[in-house]
Amino acid sequence: MGDCLFCAIATGDIPSASVHEDQHTLAFMDIQPLREGHALVIPKAHAQRIEDLGPADLQALMTTTQHVIKALKATLGVEDTTVAINNGPAAGQEVPHVHIHIVPRTTADAAGPIHALFTSRPDIASEDIQALATRLRAEVMA
Ligand code: AMP
């Protein structure tokens, strides 16, 4: 897409600290890392959200993510990572091109799980959770 930062990185028009490249994906270091080793994995094809990706890009994205995690483990001794997608602007996405964040984690970083994003939880009855699961299952199977 014309004015997309990560499309420009995918084509090499904007440089990046590249870690891995294949037919479908590119992995590179985040320019403002949350922790040492913070890397991003993107599909070369433009899509804003994960649900907009085709199956080949989706599969390659996860495969590359696994490669980068293993490289972080081998290189920095990173045992644990938070693997996250801000999937659209309401979820905090700033660059509107799918990207998987891989952030090395230690218990000492005290950042907590992704559950720490939310300071309260809605009070939803278990039968309502079950009813929603039924509706979702019908939609997934459609
Ligand atoms: P998000 O908020 O999920 O859209 O995250 C966008 C990420 O892209 C942030 O962590 C930025 O630090 C990172 N970022 C922005 N520009 C660049 C760039 N030119 N090279 C590498 N990472 C970038």
Image: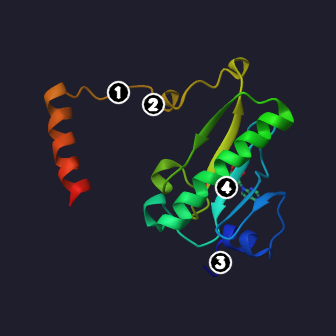
Marks 3 & 2, CB-CB < 8 Å contact = no
Q: In the rendered image, which residue does mark 4 sit on?
A: 41
Circle nearer the N terminus (1, 3): 3
Q: Which mark is residue 24?
A: none
Q: Is residue 1 above or below residue 48?
A: below
The Cα–Cα distance between marks 2 and 1, rounded to whole angstroms, is 7 Å
Q: In the rendered image, which residue does mark 1 sit on?
A: 121
Residue at point 77%, 58% (across, down): 20
Tag 3: amino acid:
Asp
> Foreground mark, 4 or 3?
4
Residue at point 67%, 55% (across, down): 41
Residue at point 55%, 27% (across, down): 113
The Cα–Cα distance between marks 3 and 2, rounded to whole angstroms, is 33 Å
Circle nearer the N terminus (4, 3): 3
Tag 2: amino acid:
Phe
Q: In the rendered image, which residue does mark 2 sit on?
A: 118
> Foreground mark, 4 or 1?
4
Circle nearer the N terminus (2, 4): 4
Residue 96 visible in the displayed image:
yes
> Is the residue marked by circle 3 packed among few (<14), some (14-19), or many (20+) residues within 10 Å?
few
Tag 4: amino acid:
Val
Tag 1: amino acid:
Arg
Q: In the rendered image, which residue does mark 3 sit on?
A: 3
The Cα–Cα distance between marks 2 and 4, rounded to whole angstroms, is 25 Å
Circle nearer the N terminus (4, 1): 4
Label 3's element? loop
The Cα–Cα distance between marks 4 and 1, rounded to whole angstroms, is 30 Å
The verdict on label 2 being within 8 Å of ligand 1 is no
